[in-house]
Image (cartoon, helix red, strand yellow):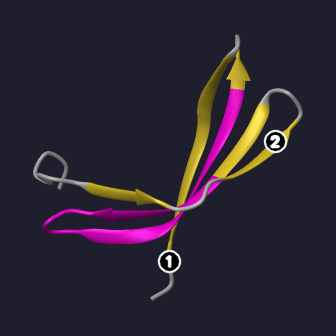
Amino acid sequence: MIGRAGQIELQLGTLEIRREGDDRAWLTFEQRYKTQSYTDSGIKQLQLRRVDGKWLIEQEVFSTAKP
């Protein structure tokens, strides 16, 4: 539950970057999330778009890892 996690441990795996033109990029990495009461791991993908010279997250997708 948000607000009750206490200490959060977040580990990120190797970052893969795929660019499409000058204003789009996809970042993919393994993410491991752990609190005292919850643990999750999987693959996170961020779709970025450059607007007025700044990279903004346009979409975020998380797929849980297979047990």
Q: Residue lying farthest bottom?
A: 67
Secondary structure state at the residue bearing disc 2 = strand
Find residue 61 and report its image quarter: bottom right
Secondary structure of the magenta portion, mostly? strand
Give the residue displayed 50% in from the left and 77% down from the top.
65
Q: Residue lying farthest top?
A: 52
Give the residue displayed 67% in from the left and 36% down from the top.
48
- Residue 39 falls inside the magenta stretch: yes
Q: Which mark is drawn over residue 65?
A: 1
Q: Nearer the viewer, mark 1 or mark 2?
A: 2
- Spot occupied by residue 53 in the image (x, y as percentages of width and height): 70, 13
- Spot occupied by residue 37 in the image (x, y as percentages of width and height): 14, 68
5 above or below 56? below
Magenta-colored span: 28-49
Going by the numbered disc 1, the residue's amino acid type is Ala
Secondary structure state at the residue bearing disc 1 = loop
Going by the numbered disc 2, the residue's amino acid type is Arg
33 above or below 58? below
- Spot occupied by residue 11 in the image (x, y as percentages of width and height): 40, 59
Dot 2 crowding, Cα within 10 Å, few <14, some 14–19, many 20+: few
Whether label 1 touches label 2, CB < 8 Å: no
Give the residue displayed 10% in from the left and 51% down from the top.
4
Find residue 44 and report its image quarter: bottom right
Dot 1 crowding, Cα within 10 Å, few <14, some 14–19, many 20+: few
Q: Residue lying farthest front?
A: 14
67 above or below 28? below
Give the residue displayed 81% in from the left and 41% down from the top.
19
66 above or below 57? below
Name the residue beneath numbered marker 2. 19
